[in-house]
Image (spheres, grey):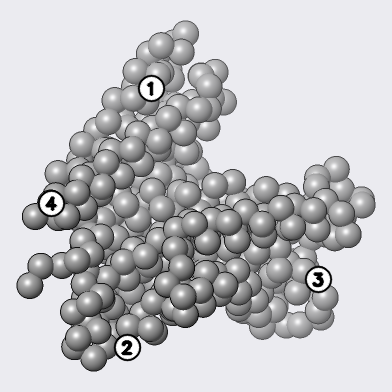
Amino acid sequence: MKSDVPEHSMRLTGSSAPFALAAALAAAALFILAAAEDPGAAFAAFFLSPFRPTVLANLIEQAAAPCICALGTALVFRSGDFNLGGEGQAYAGAALSVLALLAVPALPGPVGLAAGLAVGAAAGALVAFPSALSRRNAGADVLLSTFLVSQAVVLVLDWAIAGPFRDASSNLIATPVVAEAYRLPRMLPPSWLSFAPLLAAAGAFCMDRFMRTSRRGLELSLYGRNPRFARTMGFRVEAYAFWPLLVSGALNGIAGALLALGANGRAVRGMTGGIGWNGISIALLAGNDPRWILPAALFFSWLETGSRQASILAGIPADVGTLAKALVLLVATARFLGGRGREVRS
């Protein structure tokens, strides 16, 4: 029986991923050649500086939150839906986790940190809830609803951080700093490396086991490929149209909380900086396969770190990393949509 809904699964080892990576690196190299006065120094700064010990530790830390966002995105893609609300969900997780911890400054450190992450997860899931509910009950298009709800949340949180919850003693548009005991402990000072990458790796492992070995995971994948067949087989299709979006929102919220409780220690206006869109790019590059999401996140983090190092050390514009990531997204998306088109024509 042919699937009415194409399988949203490319693998990193497929033909699109090597081409996407090569295109990104070639674009970065051409940009450096065109913009740098000393191309040799710029190449060394971009390609090699990220592997210095302290910089590498920060690179790994920087990959953790986008990796967790990508896991949530991949889960929704595997269910046959889309979540374009990752930005607002992560922002809500960041802001509400900080505000909750500011309200209870006397908890034991580990308890407060766990509570902050839990609040972040709940906040992200809450932002995703209207879209999930309308999807389950009315078959609403989550591609549009997740984006619109997210944008509304971003505007509200921008106002809240710049207004009633702003730290008047700071030059930043940000909340007050949470208690030091609530922040992610640094494993390798002076870098900001924490347990966040371990949490991301554990999440990828658990999701991989769930999707490949559990009954619910296999049913979810089948539902994503062919909802009609899943309904015929007696699967609880209403549930599979609902909870993946909630879990995705929760994961985005956790990612935002990790950002806020890490190096920042507070919620800063606009702090998520496109993390939701990076999560989509990483998930597409990894083919929605949890085993490849962490390597893809590390690659994106390397692009960002390399462009930042090249900007500081060699004076080239920092946009080189953005350009490279945009090419990765373009190639991966073209492959994804091309696969869908071939599936529909067949």
Q: Are marks 2 and 4 in contact (CB under 8 Å)?
A: no
Label 2 vs label 4, nearer the camera: 4
Q: Amino acid at mark 3?
A: Leu
Q: Which residue is mark 3?
A: 102
Extreme residue toward the top, this view: 37
Where residue 119 is drawn, which disc sits there?
none
Q: Is residue 334 above or below residue 197?
A: above
Q: Nearer the viewer, residue 190 or 212?
A: 212
Label 3 vs label 1, nearer the camera: 3
Extreme residue toward the right, this view: 168
**Which of the two labelled residues, at mark 2 and mark 1, occupies the earlier sequence position?**
1
Who's the residue at 52% across and 51% down the image?
275
Regarding residue 51, the answer to whether it shows in the image is no
**Which of the two labelled residues, at mark 4 and mark 1, occupies the earlier sequence position?**
1
Q: Is residue 282 above or below residue 227?
A: above
Q: Is residue 100 above or below residue 62?
A: below
Where residue 345 is drawn, which disc sits there?
4
Label 2 vs label 1, nearer the camera: 2
Q: Which residue is mark 1?
A: 43
**Which of the two labelled residues, at mark 3 and mark 2, occupies the earlier sequence position?**
3
* Element carrying mark 1: helix
Horizontal side of 51 relative to 132 (left or right) equals left
